[in-house]
Image (cartoon, coloured by chain):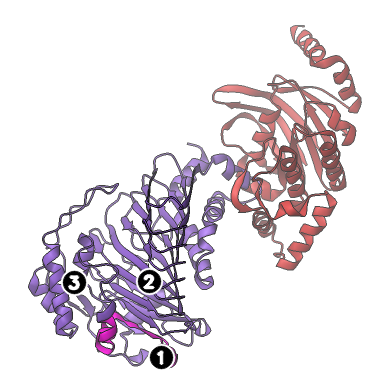
Chain colours: A red, B purple
Amino acid sequence: MLSISNLQASIEDKQILRGLNLQVKPGEVHAIMGPNGSGKSTLASVLAGRPEYEVTAGEVTFDGKDLLELSPEDRAREGVFLAFQYPIEIPGVSNINFLKTALSEIRTYKGLPQLSAKEFLKLVKEKQQLVDFDAKLTNRSLNEGFSGGEKKRNEIFQLAMLEPKLAILDETDSGLDIDALRIVANGVNQLRSSENAFVMITHYQRLLEYIVPDFVHVLYNGRIVRSGTKELALELEEKGYDWLKESVDAQNAI
Amino acid sequence: MSSEKQLLEELTTEEYKYGFTTDIEMDIAPKGLTEDTIRFISAKKNEPEWLLEWRLKAYKHFVTMAVPTWQNFKHPDVDFQDMSYYAAPKEKPKLNSLDEVDPELLDTFKKLGIPLDEQKVLAGVVAVDAVFDSVSVKTTFQKKLKEQGVIFSSFGEAVQEHPELVRKYLGTVVPSTDNLYAALNAAVFSDGSFVYIPKGVRCPMELSTYFRINAANTGQFERTLIIADDRAYVSYLEGCTAPMRDENQMHAAVVELIAMEDAEIKYSTVQNWYPGDKDGKGGIFNFVTKRGICKGNRSKISWTQVETGSAITWKYPSVILKGDGAVGEFYSVALTRNHQVADTGTKMIHIGKNTRSRIISKGISAGVSHNSYRGLVRIGKGADNARNFTQCDSMLIGDRCGAHTFPYIESKNETAMLEHEATTSKIGEDQVFYLNQRGIDSEQAVGLIVNGYAKEVLNQLPMEFAVEAQKLLAISLEGSVG
């Protein structure tokens, strides 16, 4: 589904990604971990199409299409969803109205018929229950006055509503307490299927206990330096990133 | 420049869709302003002597007054002698059916999306008075309204049919001496609307007037007078457009509202005069004096305006809260882009006891425009228990525009309760990107955000027009309608 090859990207002339490679197939859940500054958020931003980042080399194919050629909204319409690390507030725009517009755009792009108001509301109710999202929050303005946890849960609710093929979760676990984490994880697990895929960007191993990944990758210095299964995450938790950094630097020295 | 920045640039600089002109035979007075011009206008309208005298008195004041200097923009160099003060389509003075209206004229209104065909009008929900340059072209549903005693006609017609009413109220809310443009208007006013709602009558339909300036080198000076007698109710809406021209044109209107005991007047404006091109060339100077007096106890006047056009918008729809328990409201969305300028706001003058006023002002600036809110809340000595709530918000799009606020509070009564809130916000690229990432393109994103911002004001418009105003805002930013 997603194929990243030799991706290099910079921001304000600072090189962050230095040749990243990654393959994601439908039905898979990947976790990307790494120390601060390794390029985790950059990867998420570049995939979503943030204009501040410049792709200097490499290719990204999504479902056979050149993802880097598409505008951010087209990438979204193709089925790429980014759950933001810091979801932004947009006062005055109601959650419901925003979702309706987004869903409408995506359906138009895919050539699907629009949902009637009744069908839409039914979908909202269904998804609210699925990811345990408070109905009261749906009627409020987008993220306005939401707590950190509520914002993250809103991201997952939107994920449920828009049903993307590829969901990138950018440090979704940061700032969440145990209960909120459990609810978010539950929501994601409910949405997993053999047709979609998840890429979780996370700092800590904790999230991976709730959302068990098929693959774990470690990002260091703009490259994926190690890949494994969930055991790798446990090893990192135990030994810390320094262990990995040393071994990578040592390898490069040879 | 990032693609979002580019898009924001494009969005806020595109073209005005109503810029076409209509070619029909016109009767235009020669340029210049003298006492003779006034006599000419008055004669054309077949006015009674008292009205001509009223005009001449105003003109005498006008020539002694100076151009104001306190506004937050550079007053344009206006040569009052360099424009014509009368322009009217050459057609029969009394139009009894649509067949008698010049087809080109009907076509113009059709292009503007304004129904003059009575069958097509929203099933009897809206009555329309269409004013083309200086003349009211057609007023719909007059007969039906007359059955309830409601008078809705052009100002000119009212002078002929109900001179006592006009004479009684004209100039009682905005005297000719009020300001330079009020004096000018009183001297040369062309046409406008006149509404009278008798005691206890709730006007059965929305009344609306559409103003269209067409002739070049003319000024438009309409005069509107609305009276709601005891326990009456009326909701009135005015819409305005004008063609694109290189030269500026002046529009100096005066609107007077009078609400008697337990009466209510709701006055809404959707203004979309030609704003000038992206370099600031041309555009209408919209210098308007609008004032309502809540004369009777427990009367209510609310002003709602959506201002998206004009090169310069200069107006302060105000309410004088004379009666006890009177209520005044002002809701405004003013959008400026390219080189437009707005200096607008309101005055709430509390005189009676237990009066309340509410001001919600939302300014949106884009391009290199400047948007100023100027408000006055004045509490008189005898205005016990007065309350005011003011909220003025500014939104900036891009980083070269300006938003300014000049709130004034003058209180002579210590029982008054006054609240003032203000916010300034910017449409962040992050907000637009967030919406992009959900499949919404940048144009729509900005539209959504601006709409959310203006919602509180748009909700005040009569339902039939709220949707149009919403579209107008989005389109004004998109650019296809100025």
Quarter of the figure that contains the C terminus of chain B? bottom left
For discs 3 and 2, the disc positioned in front in the rendered view: 2
* Image vertical order of residue B479 relative to residue B114, above or below: above
For discs 1 and 3, the disc positioned in front in the rendered view: 1
Check disc 2 and give the amino acid type. Lys
The answer to which of B250 and B456 lies nearer the viewer is B456
Please say whether residue B405 is one of the residues in the magenta stretch.
Answer: no
**Residue B143 % position (x, y):** 41, 92
The residue indicated by pointer 1 is B146
**Discs 2, 1 touching: Cβ within 8 Å:** no
Spatial separation of the CA atoms under disc 3 and disc 2? 27 Å
* Chain name for mark 1: B
**Regarding mark 3 in the picture, which secondary structure is present there?**
helix
**Residue B46 % position (x, y):** 17, 86
Which numbered disc flags the more N-terminal residue, 1 or 3? 1
The residue indicated by pointer 3 is B188
Which numbered disc flags the more N-terminal residue, 2 or 1? 1
Check disc 3 and give the amino acid type. Val
**Regarding mark 2 in the picture, which secondary structure is present there?**
loop
Please tell me how crowded label 2 is: few (under 14), some (14-19), or many (20+) other residues with Cα within 10 Å: many
Which numbered disc flags the more N-terminal residue, 3 or 2? 3
The residue indicated by pointer 2 is B295
Does residue A203 appear to the left or right of B184 in the view shown? Answer: right
* Chain name for mark 2: B
